[in-house]
């Protein structure tokens, strides 16, 4: 990494963070009735991915997302994979992300996951392991996008001297996907508003992709068509990239108390008059219990061997896996399948003997609720702390966009833990982020 010459970036780290603050590059956390907005800490030493390594990642990620899209189309359609017993019915119908309201609804172009965020770590054995599939509203693309712009502005020579692939294509990639599935009308990004954790991203991506940024109150449905209340009168909406959870999207179909959604949006979607990105009901495919079966899906739908592998995972739902989980709980990480953002993750080696015994009883009582995984010894990356380089755990969120074809953005969000004793890297848990350099040669 020293040969790539990061000296200028290191010297400009303070200025880059200052500009991020000036431009409002923040994330917010709403907890216990209080909204706390904070800067997402940026580290100037980028993660570097060699061209050949990214080529392999690209193939594996496309394969995985294509299989997941086929799975979603099947689950809400013919259900062949359930009839053939490749995935147990209980894992679908008991998933918190499965929505009966989406049964028989075919989205525009039959695409369910248009923007997929796949979380990976690189093990010390040199292999990449997939930890999670995020197919609902994965966030984070805006941060490496804007920080690259600021870094290029502060250190232009660094990017002239190094063969780094340009990441400014993300806005165009998003626009292409929305245009491909558009049912006739303008493209809109639907935001819950400025008190959402990712509001900066919503507004930034609207600017980058040329979409209209709208809140629920700016939209309405008439005759099963979605309209935007524009300055020049109503404009028909052909595609809406919704950045709010399923349950808040339409109060007439899901949570009746939602005040941030659009009444009858689902009626317009069912009628085929608007594309919704990502499709409602996608949560069934990024359920951590379903994650266990993705390698099977790849073989079932594509007839191929998976190019990228899951972390070694056990399902207490199965008798042998339950036995292994209970016997080795002190060395495993246990995850609640319905939680996200680093919540619901328990490291067995951090529990006392009494806590382990109690947790074993919980897992035995609710086997569908948990998965257990071997702790992947993943690589540390160098970060700057008080002017000194230190090693910290880091993951990578890759962004895969599906429209006319499935493409992997040549960048990604690298998150790192700021706690030397923690393997949890989520921003909501205090983590920071880096730029991700994909080399072009």
Image (cartoon, rainbow, N blue to C red):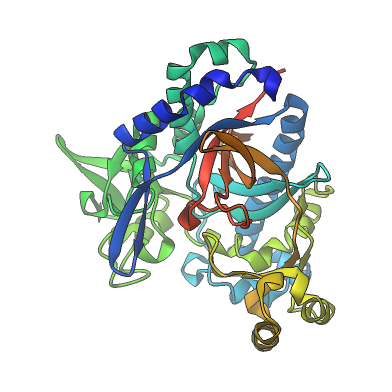
Question: In the rendering, at what x and y percent does residue 192 appear?
Answer: 31, 54
Image point (72%, 17%), residue name: 441
Looking at the image, which residue sits at the far left? 232
Classify residue 337 as left or right of residue 127: left
Question: In the rendering, at what x and y percent does residue 416 appear?
Answer: 58, 46
Above/below status of 235 relative to 157: below
Above/below status of 92 relative to 144: below
> Can residue 12 be seen at all in this image of the molecule?
yes
Image point (37%, 38%), residue name: 25
> Can residue 261 be seen at all in this image of the molecule?
no
Classify residue 409 as left or right of residue 174: right
* Numbered circles on residues, count: 0
Rendered image quadrant of residue 160: top right
Question: In the rendering, at what x and y percent does residue 108 appear?
Answer: 49, 47
Above/below status of 36 relative to 287: above
Q: Dividing the image into 4 quarters, which one contains the N terminus?
A: top right
Image point (62%, 48%), residue name: 118
């Amino acid at each position: 990494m020293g040969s790539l010459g990061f000296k200028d970036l290191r010297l400009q780290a303070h200025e880059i963070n200052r500009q991020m603050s000036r431009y409002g590059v923040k994330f917010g956390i709403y907890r216990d009735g209080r909204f706390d907005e904070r800067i997402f800490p940026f580290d100037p030493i980028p993660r570097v991915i060699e061209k050949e390594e990214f080529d392999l990642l690209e193939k594996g990620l496309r394969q995985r997302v294509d299989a997941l899209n086929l799975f979603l189309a099947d689950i809400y359609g013919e259900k062949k994979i359930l009839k053939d017993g490749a995935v147990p019915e209980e894992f679908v119908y008991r998933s918190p992300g499965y929505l009966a309201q989406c049964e028989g609804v075919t989205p525009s172009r039959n695409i369910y996951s248009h923007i997929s965020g796949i979380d990976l770590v690189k093990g010390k054995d040199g292999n990449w392991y997939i930890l999670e599939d995020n197919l609902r509203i994965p966030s984070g693309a805006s941060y490496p996008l804007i920080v690259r712009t600021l870094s290029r502005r502060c250190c232009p020579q660094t990017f002239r001297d190094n063969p780094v692939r340009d990441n400014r294509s993300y806005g165009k990639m998003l626009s292409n996907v929305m245009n491909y599935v558009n049912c006739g009308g303008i493209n809109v990004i639907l935001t819950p508003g400025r008190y959402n954790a990712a509001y900066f991203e919503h507004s930034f991506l609207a600017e980058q992709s040329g979409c209209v940024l709208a809140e629920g109150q700016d939209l309405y449905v008439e005759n099963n068509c979605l309209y935007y209340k524009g300055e020049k009168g109503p404009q028909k909406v052909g595609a809406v990239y919704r950045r709010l959870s399923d349950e808040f999207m339409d109060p007439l179909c899901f949570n009746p108390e939602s005040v941030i959604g659009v009444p009858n949006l689902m009626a317009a979607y069912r009628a085929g008059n608007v594309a919704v990105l990502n499709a409602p009901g996608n949560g069934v495919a990024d359920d951590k219990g379903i994650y266990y079966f993705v390698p099977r899906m790849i073989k079932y739908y594509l007839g191929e061997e998976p190019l990228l592998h899951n972390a070694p995972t056990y399902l207490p739902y199965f008798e042998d896996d339950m036995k292994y989980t209970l016997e080795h709980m002190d060395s495993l990480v246990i995850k609640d399948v319905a939680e996200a953002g680093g919540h619901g993750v328990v490291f067995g080696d951090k529990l006392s003997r009494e806590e382990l015994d109690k947790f074993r009883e919980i897992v035995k009582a609710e086997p569908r609720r948990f998965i257990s995984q071997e702790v992947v010894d993943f690589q540390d990356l160098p970060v700057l702390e008080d002017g000194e380089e230190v090693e910290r755990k880091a993951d990578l969120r890759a962004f895969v966009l599906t429209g006319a074809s499935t493409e992997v953005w040549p960048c990604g969000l690298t998150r790192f833990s700021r706690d030397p004793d923690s393997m949890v890297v989520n921003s909501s848990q205090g983590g920071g982020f880096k730029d991700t350099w994909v080399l072009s040669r």
